[in-house]
Each structure stands twice: as C-alpha cells, then as structure tokens.
Image: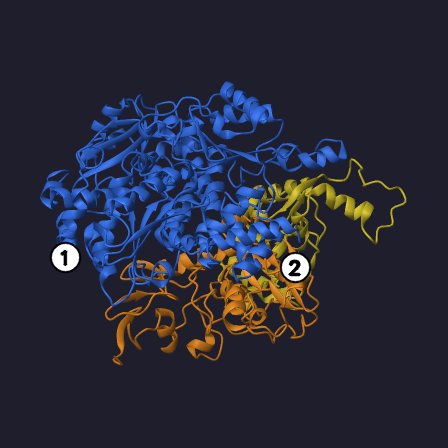
C-alpha cells in the first residue's frame, strides 16, 4: 500500500505517494505547475484549467488527476504552455482587470501568471462585462469585476469557515459569485478573518483600508515569478 | 546612412508613458544618436511627411480623432508599438466602458457631486471630437506589432524594446520588465 | 414574511420529507405555484431544508425554467433552435410579440403571459414548436400564434389549446398532446412492436454476472452519443463492496435535433423500464431514477401510470417477478431546463438538488455517483436495447448492425427533408441511404450528432452511421442548398454560449469568443488571420475544457473549417492592410453623434 507511484514528468522520473494528484506530486518534487483555482487545504475544483497537462497525450487538469504508475505527463512543452497561456488570456478579457488601480496588484496570482508567461497583451478581444460591486460589508469589499470564478472563497467559506457565505449564481457567461443574504455581503456573517477572504487569488475580495500598504518593489511577485517558492529558486527565473 | 525615424503620440493617455521614455535619463542622449524623432510631442512635429521605422502609441482610442491619428500612424510606420496599459486595454479611461455613454457625460458635466457647470450643458463645440461608445484598445482598431505593458511601462522596458527594434531583433522582455502597474 | 408562502413552502418541503437533495422538486413546485422563487421563498426553503439561502439561489439562477423574477401565469417558450428558425420561428416570434404587445423576455402588464425563447424542445420534426407551460404546440405559423394568444386571453388555460391529438399514446388521456410520433421506419429492436416483456424474466433466471456478460457479448454501446460499452459500465458499477447502488436513466435528451427518446418514452416506456430493471438486477441497484427533461413534463403523468401498473404487475417494487430479495423501484426526477444536465455527472448533480455542474472525474459515477453511491447512468435507448438483448440473446443483436457496431440506432431526422421523423435503422447504414429514405437527396450539408457533432458535405455521404465513422446520439439535421452554413455555425455557438454551465474557463469564455469571431467573419470583416485565430481558439477550447460540452462545442467551427472551407474564404475582406476591419468608426460614434446632434468630422476610413 505504501509503495510509491512512479511516473514521468517532462521526461524526468518522479516518485509520488499514492493518492496524490499530479499537481501535488510535481510540487513535492520541486516542479511547479501553474494553477489558479487549486489552493492547499481546499478541495480540488478543476475549474480554471490553468494546470492543464497532457497525460499520455490527453489533456487533463493536473489538480484533480491522480498520479498512476507509468503515466507520461507533459507540462512544460510548447503545446501545453500555449494552451495555458490561452486560458490565462481568457480570464483577462472576461473580467475588468484594471491592474493599475487594483490594490492586489503585485500580489495577484492572475497577474503573476501573466508575468510568468510573458504575456504583454491578450490575443482575444476585451469583453468589458457589467459586473456588480458589493461594498456593504464594513471591512470587506467584493468587486466582481475582478472575479475569475475560481471558487476558492466558496470552498473556504463552506469547508474551512463553516459559513457558506459564498456560492455561485447564474450560469455560463453570467456566472457570478452570490452571497448568503439578500442585502449583500454586509448582511452575511462574513468576517474579516475568514479564510474565504484570505484565499482570493485576485482583487475580487479585499480587506478594506489596508490596500497599498506594501510599496511597489516589495510585493510578492515584484521580483520573483509565481511558483519560485516551489521550484526552490532564489532569483528571477528565465521562463 | 540615414538614422531610423521614430514617431510617438498620446491618444487617450496621460502622457505618463512619454514621461517614462524621458525617464531613461542620460540614455536619451544615446537614443538621440541612434534615431531621429519625427512626428511626436517631444519635438512638436504635427504631421507625417516621411515614413517612420517605429511608431510608439500611448493611450487607447476614446474618440474619433484618436482613431484618425492611430490609422495615420499605421500607414506611416513600419512597426507599431502599443505603449502602456491604456493603449493595450484602454486603461483608466476604459473604466467608463462599464457605464453607458450618455450616463457618463451626464455624470461628468451635470450630475456629478463635484461638478461646477453654470451653463448646465454638455460641451458640444464642433471642434470637440465625438466620443466612441467605448474606449478601444489600439489593437482592436489597427494591427499592432508589439505591446509594452505598464502604467507606465518602466523606462528600462522602453529602452530594451527600442534597442531590440533598432537592431532589427524581436522584443524579448525579462521578468522584471513586464509589469501591469 | 407572508403566511401563505410560508405554509406553501412548508407543505412542499414536507412532501419531499425535508430532503435537501430533492431541492429541484421543491423549487419547481414553488415556481409553478407562484411564477417565481422569490428571495423570501429562498429564505424559507433554506430554513426548511436546513441549507443556506445562497444554495437555493445558486440552484434557481442556474436553470432556465426557474426564476427569481415573477413570470406570467402562462409562460410561452418558443423554441429558437436552428431547425425551428428554418421553419419560420422568427416570424412566429414576431407574431407573438405583436399580439401580446411585449418583447421576448417580457411579461404582459397584467402579469398573465410571459414570452421567452428556449433551446431545442425535442420537436424538430414538427417545428416551429413551443411550450406553453407544459403544453406542446407544434407546426406553428404566425396566424396560429395570434390565435393562441387570442385564446389564452379568453381562458388562460394552456390545456385548452390542445385541439387535434397526436397519434399513438399522445392521444391517451394521460398525455393528451398534439405531439406526433412521426415514426418513419421501424427496426427490429426498439420500434418493432414485437417486444414481449420476456427479457426481464430471462435475465432474472441468470446470475447478474451472466447478464452483464450477455450485454458485453452483444457489444452494446451507449446510445446517447459517447458510445461507452454498457456491459463494461455495469461491471465497473457492480465492482466494489457498496451496500447500495443506483441506476439512472438519462431522459434529458437535449442535443438539438434529437427527439427519438420522446418517441420511446411515449410508445415504449415499458421496454425502457424493463431494461432499467434488468440493469438494476445486473449491478445490484435498489433505486432507479429517470431524469426527465423539463421540456417533456407533459409525459410525466403517463410515465408514472406505467410505473404504477408495473408495480401492480409485480415487475417493479419488492420481490420482482417473485424473486425474493430483488427489490427495486424507480422515481422520476424532473429537470428544470439545462442542456448540460444531459452530461451524466451534471445530471447526477441535478438529481442531488444542486446546480447542474458536471463533477470532477475521477471518481467516476460507477465508483461514486448519486449521493456517493456507485451509479450507472444509461440512455433511454440503451436500456431498451438491453431488454431486447435479454429477450433474444446477444447473437440476435450482433447480427443486426455492422461488423463493429451492433444493433440498430434510432435517428431523429429534421430540417430540409421531405419526411422528418424517427427512423430505426441498422448501424452502419450509409448516410446517402438515410437521406434517400428521408427525402433529402439535395442536401448541401448534414449535421450528424447535433451541434456537438460534425457537419459533413456531399463528399461524405457514402460514410456510415456507426461508432467508428459518423457517430451520433440520434440527431441528424439536414441543410438544403440554400442554407447559409456560417449562420448555422453561429446559431450552434449561440446555443453553447447559452448552455455552458460556466464552471470552467475555456467553455465559459471561449464559446463567447468563438461566437464573436464567427460573427466578425459573417459580417464580412474578417481576414485570413481571423481564420487562423478561429482555428487556434477552437482547439484551445476543445483541449482545455472540463466536460463534453466544452470539448465538443468548437466542433461546428472545426468541422466546417475542414469540410466547408470555401464558405469562410468567400466572406474574407480584402481591405487596406493593417486595419481591423470590424472596427467601424460610424458605428462607434453613432451614440455620441445622437447625443451631440451632429455628425462625425472623420467619417472617412
């Protein structure tokens, strides 16, 4: 039962413990697979598709696909990188991401991924959707313009905070984050210390009155590409 | 040999990207050695009368005049570069894309809390270019060859990019030179 | 909070024993009684079912037949599928709008009638058609639309609109529908009228493992479209030591252009229930669920009566056919308007009372399905095949069909053909033969397998309908010589944009982008670069999407780029290089020009 699973990741032999996903096993081996909806300690979601890899030639989301003996996983090939890049660009045109005035800038995982992929502009047309901002909570802001529908807040609120403050509403392009009260976030029992507030990868859920505290140059991704911690590399990495 | 010509313009921008170009500091002297500035706010040349190697576009398209200028740049420049977030995605001006145009004008000139406008009229001189129904990224109006993001792009980004273009190389930016803020 | 609403919600929740997993039944009932599920109702339902308001909201906002906004007592849902449009649905819609004095999406000021459009309702063979509450009205014209409105204004009762009953069981009291079966060709397996009901007894004389072996020997594959071997699916579901297992019949036939399950449900429900019971015996299930699409609600009472009869006959319920210990019963779960719920894991989500989002795999339904129990989800037609295989043996079944694809297939043919309807034909039949039967020899293009399938032209008419060549869940749409292919592609993309659940990025965003790209080409503003862009975008969506919907939604684009390249090349623009031709200054300044009361000074390109 305790024997390890052996598989190939970009031509390298990786050993992982049974039951781990490809993303986790790769991470244990110091290989970073880009991701947005996946978050340590939350159930895998498989929605953003940024962690797409080819498993024996077939595209799979590595955050939900368990490792298996002998599988051949392709993660850093030109084809896979191009697919991921496409998905990241879709997230940029789908919402209203005005990085220049967003408090999350520099610490935003979506932005950091775009930096890591060297994206200078998306190839898709901007959709400029109309989205609602919910500022009813005294300490928390919910700005749906920046939401990427990753569902981290939904899972954290339900599974960690035990509150079910957030859930998805609508479907398709109209999918949006809904909150557990008719009167907005301020009428829910959301608290500023909730994990649901902490886990947002973008600037959609923010604590009020703490923005821009960290100066430019000292923010999380100013000098280190996202994933550097996993890759164990100190300085900037050519990617 | 003739020096390659560069043209620059600011459409719906704040000139911050031009400021960033000046921010290359002493290297501006090297740049002046390498290139000749043609139509640009830097030297105040108003019209194209020669073809240019590179056109740098700051700002997106928010009105009909921006479109006219941008198309002129496309016709007169071999390589067109969108410089800064406004050119790339509309930037701050594009925040109005989330509000209907008429409502925007009313808020700006009639109903906004800080408006002082005794005439109670929305400015409408024939000289004022008509607004587009939304702010367009430049590459949705003409084809753009390169994008240099940032608000503004760091001076080093502009320096690196121009250096590459003048050597005939494609622009490749290192991690620290791609920033969206 | 209003007392009557509180009482009603209490009563409705009690009827499902306050079971949270029966949420769809609860919200459907509240919607039916009040015309909406209001915020207040959501609070009450959440309290009764011990869940959260936002969970109720997430369900109500997901399904097309549910709404938070109040709708009219009568809701007219006109099908706007491409086939219906070809038959004049746009004119019918205009007549409805004019006669009601409202636009689509609105409700009459007196709160009586709501007009809306909906995706394929399974009536492509009698298009244009609409649902008026649960009542199907077919073969619509603008005159008929006016008449319907006039009548509804008199009595407000959709049931009174039923004038000429359809054939077969459509005319039975429990169905009372104008729907026509349009059975054009009866094959040996399903529509033969020869079924005896002996399949169940034969199966019960075998061990479950033998039943599965027979299904495998018959090489039966899923009839819903994906074609997974049924025996193997059952074997997986049976494996493991679960105390309880579930068999689900997928009657959420939503692929545009498909209506063959409608005919099975109307004419051979016994065969379907028999197959389901055999499946239950084979996998060891005690619970069966038929997931019936909301559009087929008019069949619910009839199907329930068949279930009742089967219970009284001893072929359903406790100790089936006298076999002690074999207890199995079936309930009907209504859908609420979502194409995605035809995807088996989304269907299970819906059965569990949540949004119809597909689930992550693994685990597969065979391991962990409905409420975590090992579950086999099978198509209506597949289950009918099972009953007949048991009756006549696998050899009889494999003798029908082709070398690789055993048995017959029900095909729903619609569009530009003389005889649209249901054809049961042996698998392996060449497309050309099919078109001859249907009277569609002059077809320009055939969409095989619905929007998620592929479009082929005359050079492919010698290809065959089977799992290894042109595979289909049953939808065959015929497009005559005058149809514009790109408009069909556009309509299909519109369908996918409407029906994407939005769970994963590429399907949620990518389909919107695909539609925009095709619209640009249709408007004559696209260049060669746009074709490359379209191809690459379509491939990204196909490769990165999470479930079958997004993995197949680019097919209309990809198959037409391959098989109908010329229709794209014909519309390419040859304008000035360097400009984006879809940017039109005159359009972009039109609002400002109106506000300013003057024209643009720069209206040259």
Host chain of mark 1: C
Write the residue at 55% across / 43% down: C33
Host chain of mark 2: A
Give the chain coloured blue: C
Contact (Cβ within 8 Å) of mark 2 with mark 1: no
Q: How many marks?
A: 2
Q: How far apart are marks 2 and 1 (CA)?
A: 58 Å
Residue for badge 2: A184
Judge depth for marks 2 and 1 and give the one in front.
1
| Residue A97 showing in the rendered view | no
Please determine whether, in this image, residue C366 is positioned above or below residue C124. below
Left/right placement of residue C41 relative to residue C163 reads: right
Left/right placement of residue C4 relative to residue C271 reads: right
Which colour denotes chain A?
orange
Most extreme residue toward the top, as rendered? C143
Q: How crowded is mark 1: few (under 14 residues within 10 Å), some or many (20 or more)?
A: few
Disc 1 element:
loop
Instruction: Judge by depth and name the residue closer to the eye, C179 or C259.
Output: C179
Write down the quadrant of residue A87 in the picture: bottom left
Q: Position of residue B36 (x, y in %)?
A: 62, 54
| Residue C266 showing in the rendered view | yes
């Amino acid at each position: 039962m305790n024997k390890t699973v052996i598989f190939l990741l970009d031509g390298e032999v990786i050993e992982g413990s049974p039951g781990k996903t490809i993303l986790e096993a790769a991470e244990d081996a110091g290989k970073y697979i880009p991701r947005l909806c996946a978050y340590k300690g939350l159930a895998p979601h498989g929605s953003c598709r940024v962690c797409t890899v080819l498993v024996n030639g077939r595209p799979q989301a590595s955050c939900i696909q368990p490792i298996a003996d002998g599988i051949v996983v392709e993660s850093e090939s030109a084809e896979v990188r191009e697919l991921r890049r496409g998905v990241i660009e879709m997230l940029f045109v789908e919402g209203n991401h005005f990085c220049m005035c967003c408090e999350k800038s520099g610490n935003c995982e979506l932005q950091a991924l775009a930096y890591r992929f060297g994206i200078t502009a998306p190839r898709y047309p901007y959709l400029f959707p109309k989205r609602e901002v919910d500022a009813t909570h005294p300490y928390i802001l919910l700005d749906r313009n920046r939401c990427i529908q990753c569902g981290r807040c939904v899972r954290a609120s339900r599974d960690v905070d035990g509150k079910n403050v957030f859930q998805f509403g609508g479907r398709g392009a109209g999918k949006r984050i809904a909150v557990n009260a008719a009167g907005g976030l301020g009428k829910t029992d959301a608290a500023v210390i909730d994990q649901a507030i902490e886990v947002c990868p973008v600037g959609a859920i923010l604590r009020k009155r703490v923005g821009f505290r960290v100066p430019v140059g000292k923010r999380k991704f100013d000098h280190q590409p996202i994933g550097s911690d996993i890759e164990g590399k100190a300085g900037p990495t050519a990617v | 040999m003739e020096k390659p010509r560069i043209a620059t313009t600011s459409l719906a921008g704040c000139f911050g990207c031009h400021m960033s170009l000046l921010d290359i500091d002493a290297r501006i002297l090297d740049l002046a050695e390498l290139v000749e500035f043609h139509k640009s706010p830097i030297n105040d040349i108003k019209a194209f009368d020669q073809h240019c190697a590179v056109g740098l576009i700051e700002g997106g398209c928010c009105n009909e005049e921006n479109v006219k200028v941008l198309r002129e740049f496309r016709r007169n420049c071999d390589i067109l570069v969108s410089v800064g977030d406004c050119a790339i995605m509309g930037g701050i001006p594009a925040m109005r894309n989330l509000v209907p145009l008429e409502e925007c004008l009313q808020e700006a000139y009639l109903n906004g809390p800080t408006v002082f406008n005794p005439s109670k009229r929305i400015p409408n001189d024939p000289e004022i270019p008509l607004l587009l129904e939304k702010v367009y990224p430049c590459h949705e109006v003409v084809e753009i060859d390169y994008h240099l993001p940032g608000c503004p792009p760091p001076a080093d980004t502009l320096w690196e990019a121009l250096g590459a273009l003048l050597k005939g190389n494609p622009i490749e930016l290192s991690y620290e030179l791609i920033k969206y803020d | 909070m209003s007392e009557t609403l509180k009482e009603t919600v209490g009563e409705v929740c009690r009827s499902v024993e306050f079971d949270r997993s029966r949420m769809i039944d609860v919200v459907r009932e509240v919607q039916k009684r009040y015309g909406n599920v209001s915020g207040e109702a959501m609070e009450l339902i959440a309290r009764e079912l011990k869940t959260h308001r936002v969970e109720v909201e997430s369900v109500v906002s997901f399904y097309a037949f549910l709404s938070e906004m109040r709708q009219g007592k009568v809701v007219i849902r006109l099908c706007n599928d491409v086939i219906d449009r070809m038959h004049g649905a746009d004119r019918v819609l205009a007549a409805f709008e004019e006669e009601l004095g409202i636009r689509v999406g609105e409700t009459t000021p007196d709160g009586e009638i709501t007009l809306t459009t909906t995706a394929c309702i399974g009536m492509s063979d009698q298009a244009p058609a609409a649902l008026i509450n649960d009542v199907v009205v077919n073969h619509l014209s603008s005159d008929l639309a006016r008449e319907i409105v006039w009548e509804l204004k008199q009595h407000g009762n959709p049931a009174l609109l039923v004038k000429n009953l359809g054939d077969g069981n459509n005319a039975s009291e429990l169905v009372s529908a104008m729907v026509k079966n349009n059975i054009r060709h009866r094959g040996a397996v399903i529509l033969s009228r020869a079924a005896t009901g002996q399949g169940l007894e034969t199966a019960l004389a075998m061990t479950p493992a033998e039943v599965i072996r027979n299904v495998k020997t018959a090489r039966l594959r899923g009839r819903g479209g994906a074609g997974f071997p049924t025996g193997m699916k059952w074997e997986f579901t049976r494996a493991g030591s679960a105390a309880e297992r579930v068999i689900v019949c997928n009657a959420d036939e939503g692929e545009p252009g498909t209506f063959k399950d409608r005919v099975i449900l109307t004419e051979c429900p016994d065969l379907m229930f028999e197959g389901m019971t055999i499946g239950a015996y084979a996998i060891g299930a005690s619970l069966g669920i038929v997931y019936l699409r909301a559009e087929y609600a008019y069949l619910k009472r009839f199907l329930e009566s068949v279930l009742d009869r089967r219970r009284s006959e001893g072929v359903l319920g406790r100790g089936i056919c006298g076999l002690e210990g074999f207890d199995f019963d079936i309930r009907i779960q209504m859908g609420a308007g979502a194409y995605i719920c035809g995807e088996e894991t989304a269907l299970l989500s819906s059965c569990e009372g949540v949004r119809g989002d597909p689930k992550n795999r693994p685990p597969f339904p065979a391991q962990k399905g409905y409420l975590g129990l090992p579950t086999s989800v099978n198509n209506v037609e597949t289950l009918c095949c099972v009953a007949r295989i048991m009756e006549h043996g696998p050899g009889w079944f494999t003798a029908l069909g082709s070398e690789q694809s055993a048995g017959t297939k029900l095909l729903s043919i619609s569009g530009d053909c003389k005889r649209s309807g249901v054809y049961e034909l042996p698998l392996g039949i060449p497309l050309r033969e099919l078109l001859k039967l249907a009277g569609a020899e002059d077809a320009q293009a055939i969409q095989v397998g619905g929007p998620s399938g592929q479009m082929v032209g005359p050079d492919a008419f010698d290809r065959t309908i089977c799992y290894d060549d042109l595979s289909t869940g049953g939808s065959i749409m015929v497009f005559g010589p005058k149809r514009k292919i790109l408009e069909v592609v556009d309509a299909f993309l519109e369908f996918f944009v409407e029906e994407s659940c939005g769970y994963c990025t590429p399907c949620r965003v990518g389909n919107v982008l695909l539609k925009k790209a095709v619209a640009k080409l249709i408007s004559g503003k696209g260049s060669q670069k746009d074709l490359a862009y379209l191809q690459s975008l379509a491939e990204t969506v196909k490769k990165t999407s999470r479930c079958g919907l997004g993995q197949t939604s680019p097919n209309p684009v990809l198959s037409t780029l391959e098989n109908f390249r010329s229709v794209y090349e014909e519309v390419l623009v040859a304008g000035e290089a360097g400009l984006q031709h879809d940017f039109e200054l005159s359009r972009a300044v039109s609002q400002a020009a109106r506000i300013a009361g003057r024209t643009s000074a720069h209206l040259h390109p």
